[in-house]
């Protein structure tokens, strides 16, 4: 959602509260997925996430009638669904591989560092020097988090990083859809297509989830739907460029949950890496939006 009509400044506080709550919901999704693993496969997790969200949000999607859901850009809708689904699936795989929660979530949410590169290749929007500096800061942070020279790399970290790249490609498609399709239509096709695309992942990895996992599956789906609603409401109250720094509140929530629930305490290098990735991501988002306002891409769907 671009900054074509900035809401009144007095609504910024409420917008911040809503976007932080949206990213709290996203942190809970990852926590629920980690808690459900390894008893529930990543394919089962991702299917129920999208299917439950589709059902929960159906009244909103159908509010304007079936005709309001017609899109003239099915190719872009499918592209977003494919790469958005891949991002979520790979995040769940990384968590299933016992990657620390904060590391997996941060790497999977590193898309602001890759979106300018996707825009360069796809839309010929070449980054300038200041944007390159912000990207380098973020990529140095990623290296510090992965720590390739500190022993064996957790197998889930590269998987989570690929999830971030997939998210960047999907969000680039979503950014183009924002120019023509309203949020309800775009999100309907995203959840509907993703649910269908996730069926093979469900079938090929199906094992009946234990009774203890069903509340977690329900929580994953409801939290994803809640995150979408809160994000849309937040962007109605404040411009995305002003809210984007608060997207990384998901890292704070994930670190707290990982510490309290799984006693995961990142080392000093990881904390420095986290700060650099957050700083690089925020700076690149601000700079990219300033250089190309018509290409400004923000997380309409925070993956």
Image (cartoon, rainbow, N blue to C red):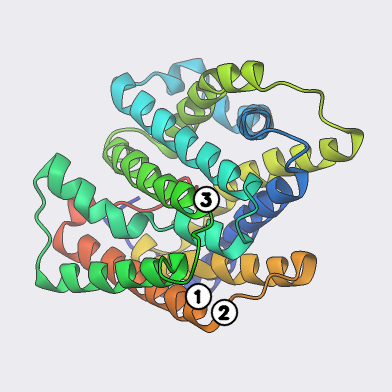
* Mark in front: 3 vs 2: 3
Please tell me whether mark 3 sits on a helix, a strand or a loop: loop
Q: Is residue 296 visible?
A: no
Residue 231 location in percent, x, y? 52, 53
User: Mark 3 = which residue?
Assistant: 155
Please tell me whether mark 2 sits on a helix, a strand or a loop: loop
Residue 134 location in percent, x, y? 24, 72
Which residue is pictured at 77% across the width and 38% down the height?
A: 218
Q: Is residue 240 visible?
A: yes
Label 2 – label 1 distance at C-alpha:
5 Å
Residue 14 location in percent, x, y? 56, 69
Please tell me whether mark 1 sits on a helix, a strand or a loop: helix
Q: Is residue 99 left or right of residue 132?
A: right
Using the image, determine if residue 210 lies above or below residue 225. Answer: above
User: Mark 1 = which residue?
Assistant: 270
Which residue is pictured at 40% across the width and 45% down the height?
A: 167
Nearer the N terminus, badge 3 or badge 2? Answer: 3
> Which of the labelled discs sits on residue 267, or is there none?
2
Q: Quadrant of residue 213?
A: top right
Q: Quadrant of residue 224?
A: top right
Label 1 – label 3 distance at C-alpha:
16 Å
């Amino acid at each position: 959602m671009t900054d074509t009509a900035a809401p009144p400044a007095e609504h910024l506080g409420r917008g911040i509260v809503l976007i932080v709550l949206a990213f709290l919901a996203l942190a809970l999704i990852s926590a629920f997925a980690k808690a459900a693993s390894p008893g529930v496969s990543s394919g089962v997790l991702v299917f129920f996430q999208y299917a439950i969200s589709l059902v929960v949000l159906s009244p909103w999607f159908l509010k304007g009638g079936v005709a309001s859901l017609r899109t003239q850009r099915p190719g872009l809708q499918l592209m977003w669904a494919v790469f958005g689904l891949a991002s979520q699936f790979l995040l769940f795989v990384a968590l299933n591989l016992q990657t620390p929660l904060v590391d997996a979530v941060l790497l999977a949410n590193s898309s602001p560092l890759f979106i300018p590169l996707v825009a360069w290749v796809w839309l010929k929007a070449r980054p300038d020097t200041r944007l390159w500096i912000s990207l380098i800061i973020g990529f140095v942070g990623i290296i510090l988090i992965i720590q390739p020279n500190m022993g064996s790399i957790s197998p889930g970290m590269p998987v989570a990083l690929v999830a971030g790249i997939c998210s960047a490609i999907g969000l680039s498609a979503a950014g183009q859809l924002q120019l023509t399709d309203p949020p309800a239509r775009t999100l309907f096709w995203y959840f509907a297509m993703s649910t269908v695309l996730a069926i093979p992942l469900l079938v090929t990895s199906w094992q009946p989830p234990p009774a203890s996992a069903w509340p977690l599956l329900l929580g994953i789906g409801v939290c994803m739907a809640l995150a979408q609603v809160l994000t849309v409401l937040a962007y109605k109250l404040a411009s995305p460029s002003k809210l984007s720094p608060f997207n990384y509140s998901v890292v704070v929530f994930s670190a707290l949950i990982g510490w309290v629930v799984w006693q995961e305490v990142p080392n000093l290098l990881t904390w420095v890496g986290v700060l650099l990735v957050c700083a690089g991501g925020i700076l690149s988002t601000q700079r990219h939006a300033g250089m190309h306002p018509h290409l400004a891409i923000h997380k309409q769907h925070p993956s």
